Image (spheres, rainbow, N blue to C red):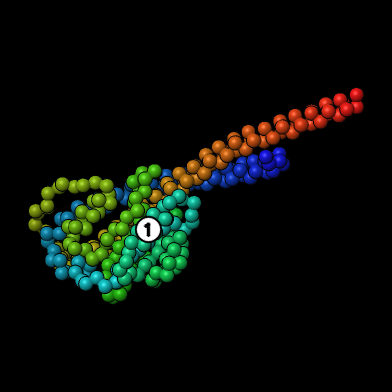
Amino acid sequence: MASTRDIRRRIKSVKNTRQITRAMELVAASKMKRAQQATLAGRPYALLMADMLGALASRVDGTQHPFLEKREIKTRGILLLTTNIGLCGALNANLFKLVGEVKSAAKFVAIGRKGAQYLARTKRDLIAEFVVDDRGSFNEVKVAIEFMTERFLAGEIDTIEVIYPRFKNTLVQTPLLRPVLPLSNVRDFAATLEVEAGVHSDSPTDTREMLFEPSAPEVLDALLPFYVNRFIHQLVLSARASEFSARMVAMKTAKDNASKLLDDLTLEYNKARQAAITQEILEIAAAQYVAA
């Protein structure tokens, strides 16, 4: 049995750990609420974009924009959304499993230091790393999106795909690989937006006559990049909500485990202390008996 001094040291250490994990749980909970609100607030906007694209789908030619052109896939472009720090359970590990399933030639762009470290450690082709704040600022995300879009238009990569944790609720975050470009057609992209928004629209095709000014290709050229930017930004918001939810749950679990361990150590300390007192009493009684 360990000495009472050793047990006291362990109790002090566990108390400090519990205090730290509780503080981290509270911080993650406050950030989680803000991130969840941002994610849920963006979903109706994504649905509106889906409706607009659906109305536009029947009025444009699939060859009128580079984002719609079919091409042979030689090199995939994958955007990996991970966290900057750990302590969020298996969130990043589940994303890395999806990366491991990519066997074809691919170039990676990372948002989040954990993802960049993993890609470098596994010697994958990491062409850029970007840092985005906890709020998932659109201006910061846009830089990464434009970087990948430029590589796509230049032919360096033939797809733009996103690996991210989709936020479902506080306890469930699903790792997904979401294709973004090229779009098979505008209507399929609209359906993808509806899936990400968590809804399904059965609204009929808009049959009204529309006049595009200055022309349909120019309107499409202005709208599609904006839609792609907004869609990927929605995925980043979902990843941020997943991160803070996973971290809050992980820190709560760590705090609860520390509390259980503290109870066990306290019981062990009391037993050791009682044994020491009993031993001292026996020694005093034995000494008195010998003296008598």
Q: Quadrant of the C terminus?
A: top right
Q: Is residue 86 left or right of residue 165?
A: right
Q: Is residue 245 left or right of residue 45?
A: right
> Is residue 62 visible in this depiction of the protein?
yes
> Is residue 233 visible in this depiction of the protein?
no
**Residue drawn at the location 59% of the way across and 35% of the way down:** 263
**Residue drawn at the location 24% of the way across and 46% of the way down:** 199
Front-lying residue, 171 or 211: 171
Residue 291's place in the image compared with 73, above or below, is: above
Q: Quadrant of residue 10?
A: top right
Residue 110 spot, x, y in % from top left: 40, 64
How many numbered discs?
1
Residue 233's place in the image compared with 77, above or below, is: above
Q: Quadrant of residue 285?
A: top right
Residue 287 spot, x, y in % from top left: 86, 29
Q: Quadrant of residue 269?
A: top right
10 Å crowding of disc 1: few (<14), some (14-19), many (20+): few
Front-lying residue, 153 or 85: 85
Hey, which residue is sitting farthest right in the picture?
Answer: 291
Residue 161's place in the image compared with 266, above or below, is: below
**Residue drawn at the location 45% of the way across and 50% of the way down:** 89
**Residue drawn at the location 31% of the way across and 71% of the way down:** 105
Q: Amino acid at mark 1?
A: Lys
Residue 23 spot, x, y in % from top left: 54, 44
Q: Quadrant of the N terminus?
A: top right
Q: Which type of secondary structure does the marked residue at label 1 adopt?
A: helix
Query: Pointer 1: what residue?
Result: 97
Residue 28 spot, x, y in % from top left: 48, 47
